[in-house]
Image (cartoon, grey):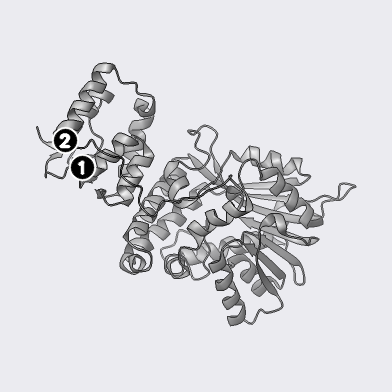
Amino acid sequence: MTVALTLAGLVRRFLGVELPVRLRAWDGSVAGPADAPTVVIRSRTALRRLLWDPNELGLARAYVSGEIDVEGDLREGLSRFWGLARREGVGKVKLSPGDRLTAVGQALRLGVIGMRPAPPPEEARLSGAEHTKTRDRAAIAHHYDLSNEFYRTLLDPNMAYSCGYWTSDAADYTVEDAQRDKLDLICRKLGLKPGMRLLDVGCGWGSLILHAATHYGVHATGVTLAAQQRQFIEARIAERGLEGRVEVRLQDYRDIPDGDFDAIGTIEMGEHVGLGNYPTYAAQLFRLLRPEGRLLLQQMSRVASAPKAPGGGSFIERYVAPDMHMRPVGETIAMLERAGLEVRDVEAMREHYVWTVDAWARTLEERAAELTALVGEGQLRVWRLYLAGGALAFQENRMGVDQILAVRPTTSGGSGMPRTRLGEVVA
């Protein structure tokens, strides 16, 4: 029997279903539906990885290393696999002794039993306790210090690496427009006016602080743990003549000494703080704000009914965002309130992330040769899988993203907020 038919038979026996995708093995054999994306198994090593790690991590390692590939729509292929896992409870399948004996016999016949293959070099290797300052720097550097040129090629000209705000579905409306509209939305919600002091905690490549200083006349300070990000922002400050109005620091949020800021933005930074440190993070945001100062926190969330994968799953945790932790938005709101902040508004933007990731994915494919030259084939495969899986998670409502607007009230309860929500948005 051919390799592909053997694998299809194992799926049928152990799961009681047919293959959800077409399969082509290293011997040229095929099995599965002809109208589905084709999963190409290029070598026995891919199956050896799955014997050692019969889960998402094993599949991710095989894909990143190029031992498995997908022809056709990668997102559709992932959707079919995840749909199968949800319907059939793949993670809960218990094999009988006879099933295990059959699986071992087939593995021997296919020649896939052997030593555990080494992980691809793109996999993060962190040491020490989670969310110490040293480990947090290493985790951030793994993803954000990849290459400024890589991100400059992939992202919009403002280098905004977070969910955009898509206010139009016109054909000529681009991700650059959506990121500009997101930055304006944040600035309006914060009520920024000339002369105010703005702090951006986890400022990325400076899109918010540069936009706010240029268009709203504020004095802006950004903090980041990524050295390449700071170098990029310093160059842009000089290019735009914003010296004295924009400052960027290589600094941990726990080490910010000053306070009394009129407004704080922290855009998709809270996911990197960790569960145990989140109360410290919330308390620090409270301390840094002046009374009646506003906080705009944009953060990804895990939908409460979704499978419990606070870090996004083993692929994200090993290859993209080590030590990331997401929770349902209600739990985040509760921690902000316990720190003394008053939450005034929450805006869900889940679908906006699908549109944002779709735009990045199109750029990734259109400029694949340039991006591969910058970071290598393995990293391009990491990003291809990351964007396809991320878009699907938001599309299927397993993950969300929200803008949470909060204020530090005065001791007598004053908020300084306008009477209406509309007034807050347009003032």
Q: Residue at x 34, y 40 (%)?
A: 58
* CA neighbours of label 1 inside 10 A, class few (<14), some (14 to 19), many (20+): some
**How many numbered discs, if any?**
2
The kind of residue on which mark 2 rests is Leu
Residue 418 appears in the figure: no
Q: Nearer the viewer, residue 260 or 344?
A: 260
Please determine whether, in this image, residue 166 is positioned above or below residue 97: below
Please determine whether, in this image, residue 54 is positioned above or below residue 89: below
Q: Is residue 371 left or right of residue 11?
A: right
Q: Is residue 414 left or right of residue 239?
A: right
Find numbered disc 2 in the image and state the secondary structure of the residue it sits on. helix
Q: x, y percentage for residue 298?
A: 61, 52
Q: Is residue 315 left or right of residue 65?
A: right
The kind of residue on which mark 1 rests is Arg
Q: Nearer the viewer, residue 167 or 331?
A: 331
Q: Residue at x 42, y 69 (%)?
A: 153
CA gap, disc 2 to disc 1? 8 Å
Q: Tags 2 and 1 in contact by the CB under 8 Å rule?
A: yes
Q: Earlier in the sequence, mark 2 or mark 1?
A: 1
Q: Residue at x 12, y 41 (%)?
A: 29
Q: Which residue is mark 1?
A: 44
Q: Which residue is mark 2?
A: 110
Q: Residue furthest top?
A: 97
